[in-house]
Amino acid sequence: GKKKPLVIITRKLPDPVETRMRELFDARLNVEDRPMTQPELVAAVKEADVLVPAVTDTIDEALIAQAGERLKLIANFGNGVDKIDVAAASRRGITVTNTPNVLTEDTADMTMGLIISVPRRLTEGANVLLGDGKWGGWSPTWMLGRRIWGKRLGIVGMGRIGTAVARRAKAFGLSIHYHNRNRVLPAVEDELEATYWESLDQMLARMDIISVNCPSTPATFHLLSARRLALMQPSAYLVNTSRGDIIDEDALVKLLQDGKLAGAGLDVFEQEPAVSPKLLKLAHKGKVVLMPHMGSATIESRIDMGEKVIINIRAHVDGHRPPDRVLPLRN
Ligand code: 8YV
């Protein structure tokens, strides 16, 4: 039969995915559960027919310039391709694919979790018993948070995940507002009773909770800048499960420290896996809830993401257009 393509996978993947990849491809798996070093990545792009990176790998123009003739597909394990220079890949005739849809609901669940956790002080409450095990007892005025029911949620980026967050939030009694480059379909606006804000500034100024659900692109870098964050009400909360660099993290920290923002729930950071000590301090004070990039971290999502990677590779090697091809940004 045909020679199997050499597929180099940068990270350890769930067992069923690795088993399937071994059956279908000449799969080179990363047995150590750590990101590849730069020399390892260079060796991989020189040799592979297909590279399967994850969010911890930076596939920039300089790396792509070192790719061998054989490399024709970068099948990302993950939805966000912000660490991959898709335009540079495209110029070299390398296709890029991602794994949309399968992680939408889980990421929306995590987002909803943060939308509830921060105002209702879930982790703070749990830590009372964990910390020193001392609970002084119930009191009518102790550990009071803020209700989310009846509040206004502003979603920045109304794509698949943003819409899934909106559905959940509506069921929890929040009113749905959103900012997006384009309005969503009237049927979706009707279903969610959603209000479209053409002006992000105006939306930020009027919301009780903001959820960031847009991709990280040059156009969204620090979209929530110091100036824009300062427009939010001091009683407002900010949640981010997309990418850290959409928010000016230093400016966010400053506002939280100065009491000009009520709290934040962050699953992503500007310098992962490093988290600023200032944010950790705010977490200890109960002002913020910090998660280590876990939006899609379910067995189900991660297996389905692997399946998507496999589907994209198979389509590509069979000479078809892979279903999840990512096109270079046009801006
Ligand atoms: C993963 C994600 O944690 O899909 C994404 O964009 O951020 C998460 O699903 C990770 O990126 C997988 O590489």
Image (cartoon, grey):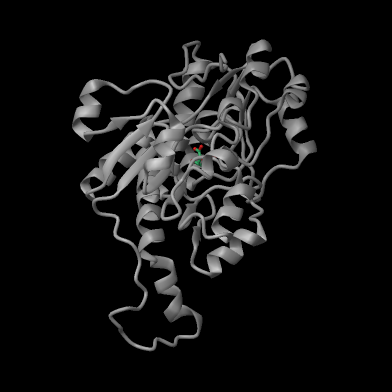
| Residue at point 66%, 37% (across, down) | 57
Horizontal side of 25 relative to 136 (left or right) equals right
Quarter of image, res 69: top right
- Against 283, residue 108 (above or below) is above
| Residue at point 46%, 79% (across, down) | 130
Q: Position of residue 173 (x, y in %)?
A: 22, 49
Could you tell me how many numbered marks the image carries?
Answer: 0
- Against 321, residue 236 (above or below) is below
Q: Position of residue 140 (x, y in %)?
A: 28, 80
| Residue at point 64%, 22% (across, down) | 49
Q: Nearer the viewer, residue 212 or 107?
A: 212
Q: Position of residue 128 (x, y in %)?
A: 44, 78
Horizontal side of 186 relative to 64 (left or right) equals left
Q: Quadrant of the C terminus?
A: top right
- Against 79, residue 236 (above or below) is below
| Residue at point 45%, 86% (across, down) | 133
Q: Nearer the viewer, residue 280 or 29?
A: 280
